[in-house]
Image: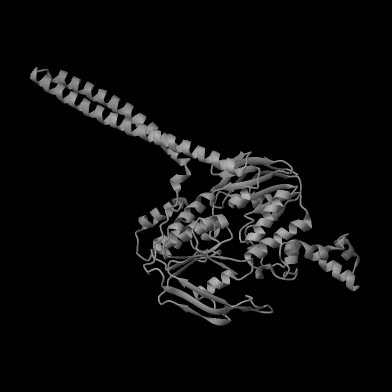
Amino acid sequence: MSIIVSNMSYCLPDGKFIFKNISFSISPKSKCALVGANGCGKSSLISMLAGKTTSAEGDITLGNTPYIVPQHFGQYNELTVGEVLGISDKLSALHSILSGNYSEKDFEILGDDWTIEDNVRKALDSWDLTHINCDMQLGSLSGGEKTKVFLAGIELHNPRILIMDEPTNHLDESSRKMLYNFIDTFSGTLLAASHDITLLKHFSSILELSDKGIRRYPMSFDEYRELADNEKRALVENAECLKKELRKERNIARKVAERQQKQNSRGQRNSEKKCVARIALGNLKNQAENSTARLNGMHNDKIETLKGKIAEATSEISEIGRMAVDLSSSDIHNGKILIEAKSLNLTFPDKGYLWPENINLTIRSGDRIRVTGRNGSGKSSLMRIIMGDLAPACGTIYRSDNLKCLYLDQEYSLIDNNATVAQQIQRFNRNSLQEHELNIRLSRFLFPESCWDKLCKTLSGGEKMRLSLCCLMVADNAPDIIIADEPTNNLDLFNMEVLTDTLYNYSGTLIIISHDSDFANQLSLTTHIDL
């Protein structure tokens, strides 16, 4: 079943177009990855394909009803797992029939799905959700468990069109491998928005969404990356050539102006010596000035033309807007004990202890730690204990005096969703920076003036991460420990590289929760905690 999008546009209430007049098609049984910078409209496009956004212009033709694996789960948190999977009515009808308290409508609802209960159990178990039942609220599950519930629904509904938005977000390593294998064997039409490089390598075609529209690359991700790098280099080289030509033209214009001025002065002196009449002298002066004006005008036209070409060339180079991140580091000497935990554990209602064995942990200044574990294993809970936001059910924990911890969590808790971008950055302005200095920092983090009055709740996940980093830079408060919980979630490929470089160069204590092995390997993490 195909996907056809014709002249699609989406405009925000403030009149700003996220994208305009984009068109593309995906043929039946094709597997296509959707990539693009944060905020370019990938999730909005997927929402339109899912029928969730109707305020757009253009036409969408789908060969079948698509099944959607969403990136954000807020709208589903109050629903039960059965309701999320779209089978709660059938389960209710089946239970009514089996209990003998049924009506004809129950048979209509159930149809031929007499094995629906077994099928649901099988689908959930296949994604390692053996502890999950259909009566549980989705909001009670971890991020990875929520994603896997939607993935389990694929087996139940057997869709011919599957659309996924950042499906590897929150997934543990084993679940990611399962997803990669599933993509390889899926026989329907597949469109997935993702920045997971490993996932992208399982697709045969790339759709790149940008402010210039949408472009198709009928090739593997590695081939697309190589082509994009070559195009970027060509753009950079062109921009540098234009800048060189501009410098040359400005130098010529300056020399011409100086030469003409000398000639004019010399001519005036000679005329005075020869006692040229005042009227004739005035004519000569006017002629010289007109000649100078023509020359200056000619060179100024060339200069302005070159400046326009340079502006056009540099606007196409993503590195023009490269984030500049340089987190300060703690001045605590390496090796000092910052955190020491003994026999830690947590309890949850009806679940007993969270961890099979109590946790003993020592964190020293300068340590670089990676934390992994299956979805629901308590990674984020352990970080909350370390931060002092959650008390353990048993055990003790020591924290060094005046310990400054920075927590980059998955929910972007640093961000006030009801504040504007400008208000958010001002709240971290502890050094009373001038407004123009704050604006410069916002621009460095890819927030132009047009975004400053934008509400934070309208930002994409990647934009919220960038704004969080910008706030930390403005605060200029050197942390002793940085804890980053799946920090690459929602970041585009370019900004992921920037974040990787930033954390790699940070010399303080670093704790990373990440199932992205490529990302973790680049950070030289020396200690591994597996829950």
Q: Residue at x 53, y 57 (%)?
A: 521
* Residue 52: percent from left, percent from top: 67, 54
Q: Is residue 192 left or right of residue 290?
A: right
Q: Nearer the viewer, residue 377 or 488?
A: 377
Quarter assignment of residue 81: bottom right
* Residue 514: percent from left, percent from top: 56, 61
The image's colouring method is: one colour
Q: Nearer the viewer, residue 14 or 190?
A: 190
* Residue 40: percent from left, percent from top: 55, 48
| Res. 425 in view | no
* Residue 484: percent from left, percent from top: 51, 64
Q: How many discs mark residues in the rendered view?
A: 0
Q: Residue at x 55, y 44 (%)?
A: 210
Quarter assignment of residue 390: bottom right
Q: Vertically, is 302 above or below 172?
A: above
Q: Residue at x 77, y 57 (%)?
A: 155
Q: Quadrant of the N terminus?
A: top right
Q: Quadrant of the C terminus?
A: bottom right
| Res. 202 in view | yes
Quarter assignment of residue 352: bottom right
Q: Is residue 134 left or right of residue 343?
A: right
Q: Vertically, is 524 above or below 293?
A: below
